[in-house]
Each structure stands twice: as structure tokens, then as C-alpha cells.
Amino acid sequence: MKPNTTKAMHRLIVQIKDALPFNEIDSNFCSDVCTGCSVKLISFIEIEIDNWEYRLNKGKVPNFKDINKLANTAKKIRTVLLKNKLI
């Protein structure tokens, strides 16, 4: 049976939303330690997720490369947020 990449992308999006602090962005979000602009990174991944949710709702079927790309992007952003002591 062929894997359902649409379900996998939906699951990945839910996992990313659970793992990253999307609702905590405010003026106090930046920390003293900064290895990357956390606000810009959160905004970027939020746009990527919104884009994929829109595409999935329109019937676009992601391939494994699409899923892997979004997962790797989220992992890198999470790493930066951890270094900045924000999660």
C-alpha cells in the first residue's frame, strides 16, 4: 500500500504547531542571546505552514521531498529557538 503523503503532511503540520511557540511572539520574545532572529524564523515557518494548509485544502498532494523540506526547516528553526533559550 502506498503511503498517504497528504495525511503525513497534516500530521507534520500539527507536530510543528505543537512544538514551536507561535502564540508567544511579542515584544519580549527576543532573548539576550541571539543566534538568529527568532521572530523572523517563526514568521517564516508560519507562512510555510499556512501555504501548505492552503495547498492541501485545494487538493495538492505533497511528495516526500515536500514533507522532508518542511520537517528539516522546522527542525532548524527549533534548534535556533533552543539556542536562544526561547523553548
Image (cartoon, grey):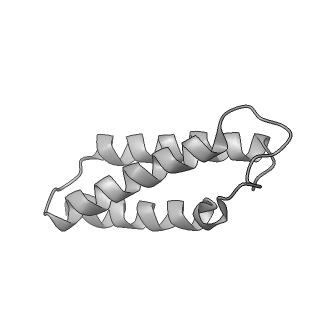
The answer to whether residue 8 is above or below residue 42 is below
Residue 4, compared with residue 38, is above or below; it is below
Residue lying at the far right in this picture: please name it: 32
Q: Using the rendered image of the protein, determine whether residue 4 is visible from the camera's viewpoint.
A: no
Q: Position of residue 23 (x, y in %)?
A: 61, 67
**Which residue is nearer to you in this view: 51 or 13?**
51
Residue at the image position 56 percent from the left and 49 percent from the top = 42
Q: Is residue 52 above or below residue 7?
A: above
x and y percentages locating residue 59 in the rendered image: 13, 63
Residue 74: percent from left, percent from top:
53, 47
For image coordinates 30% across by 53% down, the residue present is: 51
Identity of the residue drawn at 51% across and 49% down: 43
Name the residue furthest front: 27
77 with respect to 83 (left or right): left
When asked about the image quadrant of residue 34, the answer is top right
Residue drawn at the location 31% of the way across and 40% of the way down: 65
Q: Is residue 56 visible?
A: yes
Where is residue 45? Give x, y as percent.
47, 49
User: Can you name the residue that lies furthest to the left here?
Assistant: 59
Give left or right: position of 74 versus 64.
right
